[in-house]
Amino acid sequence: MRIPLRTLGLGLLLVSGATQAGWFSHKSKPAPPPPPVAVVVPMPPPPPPAPIPLEFSGIQTAAPVQAPLDRLNSASPEVQSVAQWVGSSHDNAGLPFLVVDKANAQVYAFTPFGQLKATAPILLGMGHGDIPLVSADAPMSAIPPEKRITPAGRYLSSLVTDAHGKQVLSIDYKNAISLHIVVKGTPAQQRAERLASVTSADNRISFGCINVPPGFFTQVVSPDFTPAHGIVYVLPETRSAAQWFGFQPPVTVPSAPQAPVTATAMQTSPTAPQAAPMSGEGASAAPATSSK
């Protein structure tokens, strides 16, 4: 039987098309691409439970008492705004930190997670201001009271041993400013009485250093700053903390009368009253190598 050439050509054309289409191919289709691998970002561990804050008295022999967990609510709006800023921005770089409220003569200690740990009254420089007005090598006896200033700022601080073999927290090394246990001073300075008084108006007596109760230093400052450095924020008194440290102040809707102060309260802290002088504030200064 003879197949017409026309039919044979049509058949070859169909076979060629089928071959190109893969009808007679035994090759399996390529596998679909695998689904994208989900990137799992590990979450940081949650902070430890907040410690019960300790409240240290200015009476040097008194033991600290437990403060309420919301103790920070009774701090000044400036302290609250700085604590909130540090906690949200992690400006402390995971280090323990102190907030020194010059206007109210108080210091607040925080854990690396921004949790309030302790608070205590302090003594500070006699002069009002935020910038040192004398050189660090000036004899203390030559510094007039109005220039004995505790400078404001953010300080990377560490424990050092002073010339008398005592441990102090070096804050502003260039200007010889440190935080240490309250020194006896001269009898006329009445430093112990000033620290123990119920008012902060008489707590300005030092040459610029920050004097704290012994228990606060040995139980809080020394253990927290022993493994590594820490941060000390000394709040200004000539401008707001937000202006000094360069953060946006928190803004809140005005609250109802008698509502408790929150950590986002407006920064409108009052100016600290001028220290009420006690007798002997102009007494002769200690040697420059001693705690001041």
Image (cartoon, helix red, strand yellow):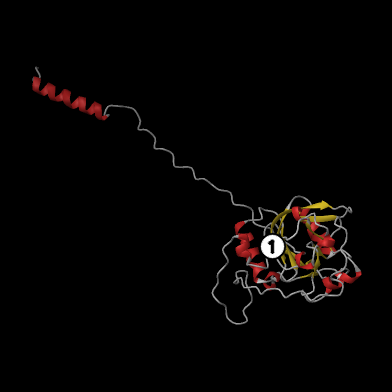
Comparing 272 with 157, the one in front is 272
The image quarter in which residue 242 lies? bottom right
Extreme front residue here? 142
Residue drawn at 69 percent across, 62 percent down: 115
In the rendered image, the quadrant that contains the C terminus is bottom right
In the rendered image, the quadrant that contains the N terminus is top left
Whole-percent x and y of residue 59? 85, 71
Residue 217 in the figure: left or right of residue 249: right
Comparing 158 with 221, the one in front is 158
The reply to whether residue 88 is visible in this rendering is: yes
The image quarter in which residue 259 lies? bottom right
Residue 185 in the figure: left or right of residue 267: right
Disc tally is 1
- Circle 1 packing at 10 Å, graded few (<14), some (14-19), many (20+), is many
Extreme right residue here? 187
Whole-percent x and y of residue 91? 63, 56
Residue drawn at 60 percent across, 69 percent down: 264
Q: Disc 1 designates what residue? A: 115
Name above or below for residue 39 compared with residue 242. Answer: above
Residue type at numbered disc 1: Gln
Comparing 245 with 48, the one in front is 245
Whole-percent x and y of residue 196? 84, 73
Whole-percent x and y of residue 150? 74, 63
Residue 10 in the figure: left or right of residue 36: left
Find numbered disc 1 in the image and state the secondary structure of the residue it sits on: loop
Extreme top residue here? 1
The reply to whether residue 62 is visible in this rendering is: no
Comparing 110 with 151, the one in front is 151
The image quarter in which residue 265 lies? bottom right
Extreme bottom residue here? 257
